[in-house]
Amino acid sequence: MSAEAQPDDTRDLRQPDESLDLRDTFRRWRANRPFWGGLLLTLGGAEILLTEKASLKVVLHIGMQGLAGYLLPTTMLLCGLLILFNPAQRLFYSLLGILLSLGTWVTSNLGGFFIGLLLGAVGSCLAFGWLPDQEPRRRLLRRGHA
């Protein structure tokens, strides 16, 4: 068999795949910020905004349906994104997020029919409780000695 007839598969199989490298990069980025808290707060604000625009005949019109009905969920969405991209100020953004989430109860269809309100409240609490540079906890097995 000549050198020309051999298959041209000369790539090194030990090199990491690009998708694994992107996945590891994303995991490191996610570990350095309150990811789930910011994501839930963002999703809560987006859900409330979508229910404001819903063309349902069941939409409740309680409270101020003017500017505040759109301003509060938009600010919730912005706080969630700021928690993701500026985690140093997470305490302020999470406190503002919980107040805005509770304010949507009055201004935005009962907080997006409770779903957006709950997403925003849980996301704000997760972001508030997140601690940076914390060592992973090891589970201790407790065995009962009789």
Image: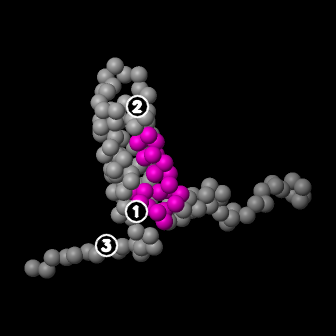
Question: Closer to us: mark 3 or mark 2?
Answer: 2
Mark closest to the chain's N terminus, 2 or 1: 2
Q: Amino acid at mark 1?
A: Leu
Q: Position of residue 132 (x, y in %)?
A: 44, 70
**Majority secondary structure of magenta residues:** helix
**On the rendered structure, is 23 left or right of 117?**
right
- Disc sitting over residue 66 in the figure: 2
| Segment tinted magenta in the rendering | 71-94
Label 2 crowding class (10 Å Cα cut-off): few <14, some 14-19, many 20+? few
- Residue at 41%, 60% in the rendered image: 92
- Residue extending furthest toward the left: 146
Mark closest to the chain's N terminus, 3 or 2: 2
Which sits in the foreground, 111 or 72? 72
Which sits in the foreground, 141 or 122? 122
Question: Closer to us: mark 1 or mark 3?
Answer: 1
- Residue at 68%, 65% in the rendered image: 15
> Is residue 67 within the magenta segment?
no
Q: Disc 2 on helix, strand or loop?
A: loop
- Residue extending furthest toward the top: 57
**On the rendered structure, is 44 left or right of 4?**
left
Q: Position of residue 40 (x, y in %)?
A: 41, 49
Residue 29 found in image quarter: bottom right
Can residue 47 be seen at all in this image of the molecule?
no
Q: Amino acid at mark 3?
A: Arg
Residue of label 1: 91
Quarter holding the N terminus is: bottom right
